[in-house]
Image (cartoon, coloured by chain):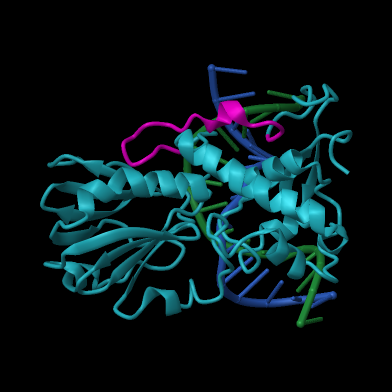
Chain colours: A cyan, B green, C blue
Amino acid sequence: MPELPEVETTRRGIAPWLAGRRLLGAVIRDGRLRWPVPADLNERLTGATVSTVDRRAKYLLLRTDRGTAIVHLGMTGSLRILPEPPTAGPHDHVDLLTESGVLRYNDPRRFGSVHWTESDPAGHVLLAGLGPEPLSPDFDGGYLHAVSRRRNVAIKVHLMNSRIVVGVGNIYASEALHRAGIHPLRSAGRVARPRMDLLAASITAVLEDAIRAGGTTIRDFYGGDGQPGWFAQSLRVYGRTGEACLSCGTPVKHVVMTGRATYYCPRCQR
DNA sequence: AAATTCTCCTGAAGGC
DNA sequence: TGCCTTCAGGAGAATT
């Protein structure tokens, strides 16, 4: 389940194989993703040269001199660089053929997507309304505090709102709140400024730690090099219901918030 | 307007 | 062992 660290790990894994390389074509084996893969993707990008592979929120941007492919991994999507000639398997939806191998998009649950735009991707409908990057200077406790005033929504749900801040999914929302000592059910508007400073710092820290570990592999995440992420071993509350809080020993609890499992320590988090 | 619920999908896991 | 049912969740759409 890719969140920001997993997408960033993927970006770092595939970028060296794509930047500066010419695209030889696209093979849409099964275009049924969250939105249909553009049928003319092959014509559009054949012959294009990749400039950079960037990330905005959980979207990967394959920028070329002809346009930009916008790729989202959804829940179970993955991008791998494979040597030629690759044999296609189940859920291998799209291949991008390059001079130096194949970039393969695989997605069993089909929650991901591939778009193509020939305008500034920042203005694309998928990206236009997004909040700041949590690893950018735009994001800090002052900002988080300001956008939380008079908001009754639970702070955990608030953090997962991409208009507030991007890239913080279910796993890292729980982890950041535990690090900051804030109860996930607390109203966003009732987190005081000093605790917002700590929360913003905790979000940044947990994401950076996870990127450093190559992401979190719960079930099905593998980076661009096929390696799993190791951050699962560093999770302090996520998936640890009944196990001892690593700070105080109290058994970790979980509640379901807007359909998502939410883990917290009832003693450390208020 | 803000907050909540619904929806897409399939593999894994749990129950009997 | 095997067939059920349930669960997981990113994020836009629909609803309250």
Q: Quadrant of residue B7?
A: bottom right
Q: Position of residue A234 (x, y in %)?
A: 60, 28
Q: Is residue A231 above or below residue A195?
A: above
Q: Quadrant of residue A32?
A: bottom left
Q: Position of residue A182 (x, y in %)?
A: 81, 46
Side of B5 where A115 appears, left or right: left
Q: Residue at x 16, y 64 (%)?
A: A49
Q: Nearer the viewer, residue A102 or A9?
A: A9
Q: Is residue A2 visible?
A: no
Q: Residue at x 68, y 35 (%)?
A: A238
Give me the residue at 71% from left, 43% from top: A174
Nearer to the camera, A212 or A36: A212
Q: Which residue is pictured at 66% across the width and 49% down the height? A: A201
Q: Is residue A232 magenta?
A: yes
Counting from the top left corner in percent of width and height, residue A157 is at 74, 57
| Viewer can see residue A208 | yes
Q: Is residue A124 magenta?
A: no
Left or right relative to A227: residue A101: left
Quarter of the image containing the C terminus of chain A? top right
Query: How many marks on residues?
Result: 0
- Relative side of A130 to A159, left or right: left
Q: Which residues are magenta?
A: A221-238
**Magenta highlight: main SS:** loop
**Residue A200 sits above or below residue A174 on the image:** below
- Dividing the picture into quadrants, the one containing residue A155 is bottom right
Q: Measuring from the top left, give residue A228's x and y in whole percent.
A: 43, 31
Left or right: residue A17 compared with residue A158? left
